[in-house]
Amino acid sequence: MREARFRAVEKVLKWARKNSLWYFNFSTGCCPDELLDTVGCRYDLERFGCIQKQDPRQADLLIVSGAITQKSAPYLKEVYEVMLNPKYVMAIGSCASTGGAYCPPYSDAVIPGVQNLIPVDIFVVGCPPRPEAIMHGIIKLQEKISESNEI
């Protein structure tokens, strides 16, 4: 009986976690423009439970968009460490995923991919990605959360 209650509570917690993703946007490039389009009234990212927070201590999703340089890398790590567990990371665009056109050997100042600094859960491809692709990434992250074993 106790295990059935535990599974029911676990199911409710996963449902609540996947449908209330509060995100913090760490943006350094042109991809935040597409994220703003996704948040706008035409696509309405809030219907998926995604609400932007101004403080990373309140967010559970970190959206990284744009190229990460050697100078901004410590700040990104600090933002990631401040977030509460469980925390998820989404890399938007080719600059955040691979360094884009600015990656080595063209520039040593850009880190070739956010995954070299922090663990990334979802990659959204494109330069910049369309709002539909960002929404698809959110849906894939929600599926990943509902299938996870953590409470």
Image (spheres, grey):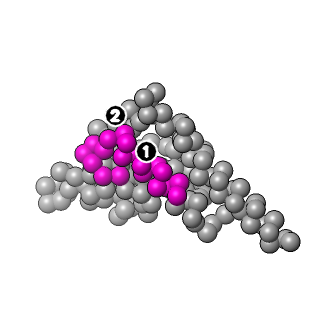
Q: Which residue occupies 49% across, 55% down?
A: 141
Q: Is residue 61 visible?
A: yes
- How many numbered discs sit on the rendered protein? 2
x and y percentages locating residue 8 in the rendered image: 76, 62
Quadrant in which the N terminus is drawn: bottom right
Q: Main secondary structure of the magenta part?
A: helix
Badge 2: residue crowd in 10 Å (few <14, some 14–19, many ≥20): some
Q: How far across and down, in percent of the image, does residue 46 sit?
A: 53, 36
Query: Circle 1: is it few (<14), some (14-19), or many (20+) Cα within 10 Å?
Result: some
Q: Which residue is more in the foreground, 144 or 113?
A: 144
* Dot placed on the residue nearer the N-terminal end, 1 or 2: 2
Q: Report the front residue among 7 and 105.
A: 7
The residue under label 2 is 33
Across and down, in percent, residue 66 comes to 31, 46
* Outermost residue, left side: 106
**C-alpha separation, residue under disc 1 versus residue under disc 2:** 14 Å
Tell me, yes or no, whether the highlighted magenta stretch contains residue 130.
Answer: yes
Residue 123 painted magenta: no
Q: Which residues are magenta?
A: 124-143
Residue for badge 1 = 135
Image quadrant occupied by the C terminus:
bottom right
Q: Mark 2: which amino acid?
A: Asp
- Asked whether 125 or 117 is in front, the reply is 125
The reply to whether residue 82 is visible in this rendering is no
In the picture, residue 27 is in which quadrant?
Answer: top left
Name the amino acid, label 1: Met
Q: Please tell me whether residue 46 is drawn above or below residue 11 in the rendered image.
A: above
